[in-house]
Amino acid sequence: MTQDQTTDATPPGRPATVPDDGLTTRERRNRPVLAVHTGEMKGKSTAAFGMALRGWALGMPVAVFQFVKSGKWKVGEEEAFRALGAVHDSTGQGAPVEWYSMGAGWSWTRKKGTEEDHAANALEGWQEIKRRLAAEQHGFYVLDEFTYPMTWGWVDVDDVVETLANRPGFQHVVVTGRDADPRLVEVADLVMQTQKIKHPMDAGQMGQKGIEW
């Protein structure tokens, strides 16, 4: 890769242009970000959790909502973030962490063992996120695989876009999943699209610990 290609692919340390918006550099820097990680290749959630890790280290309360993965599938990131939450509880370092998986049931209303329709379950999760955003309850949200409920019509895209675009206070939000709706992409501040060049599964290799989970 040439220097020119690197410059084109990676934003420089300073913006190419400074908008005439009346804000100081500090004010413009300290604005919450809505990020969308989309594309066909793995790494979307991993990148989001890496960002959340930075937020935790800086004292931002973290909330993760997983919309597709089964609650029985304990991914490595969940174990790590629950451990970080315990570190905060015992030492005060970092920030509180809350982790919810749709497959395990949203813990604020569902009774253990209750079976509900997936669409109603996803909508329930989204309504809870809306309440938390309105209350400015967390500093960093990961809405993992949230593009799928939007694609499948389980939640209203326009409602999601309006809510995220107009959320109060300082709350970072990262949405992950394939086929992000263009309306969501339009209002996002940061959009990343992953593309597969090569994957072990192409050669028949199954998912590996530490790589896929």
Image (cartoon, grey):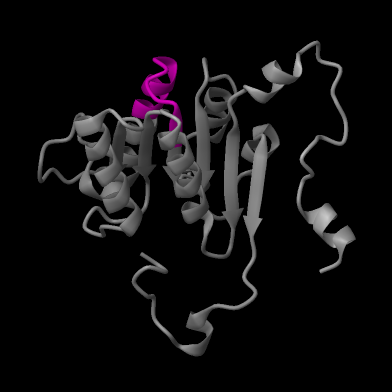
Q: Is residue 47 left or right of residue 84?
A: right
Residue 127: x and y in percent read 37, 27
**The C terminus lies in quadrant:** bottom left
Using the rendered image of the protein, determine whether residue 21 is visible from the camera's viewpoint.
yes
Q: Is residue 182 left or right of residue 143?
A: right
Q: Which residues are magenta?
A: 127-141
Of all residues, the one furthest to the bottom in this rendering is: 203
Up the image or down, 192 lies above or below 54; here it is below
Tell me the quarter of the picture where residue 130 sits. Answer: top left
Is residue 38 inside the magenta stretch? Answer: no
Using the rendered image of the protein, determine whether residue 123 is visible from the camera's viewpoint.
no
Which residue is rendered at x = 37% and y = 68% of the image? 210
Up the image or down, 73 lies above or below 137; here it is below
Residue in the foreground of this view, choosing between 132 and 86: 86
Residue 27: x and y in percent read 68, 16
Of all residues, the one furthest to the top in this rendering is: 22
Tell me the quarter of the picture where residue 53 sits. Answer: top left
Count of numbered circles in the view: 0
Which residue is rendered at x = 54% and y = 78% of the image? 199
Is residue 140 inside the magenta stretch? Answer: yes
Residue 157: x and y in percent read 54, 35
**The N terminus lies in quadrant:** bottom right
Up the image or down, 24 lies above or below 83; here it is above
Which residue is rendered at x = 51% and y = 34% of the image? 173
Which residue is rendered at x = 81% and y = 58% of the image? 6
Q: Is residue 81 left or right of residue 177?
A: left
Residue 207: x and y in percent read 39, 75
Tell me the quarter of the picture where residue 74 sits. Answer: bottom left
Of all residues, the one furthest to the left in this rendering is: 112
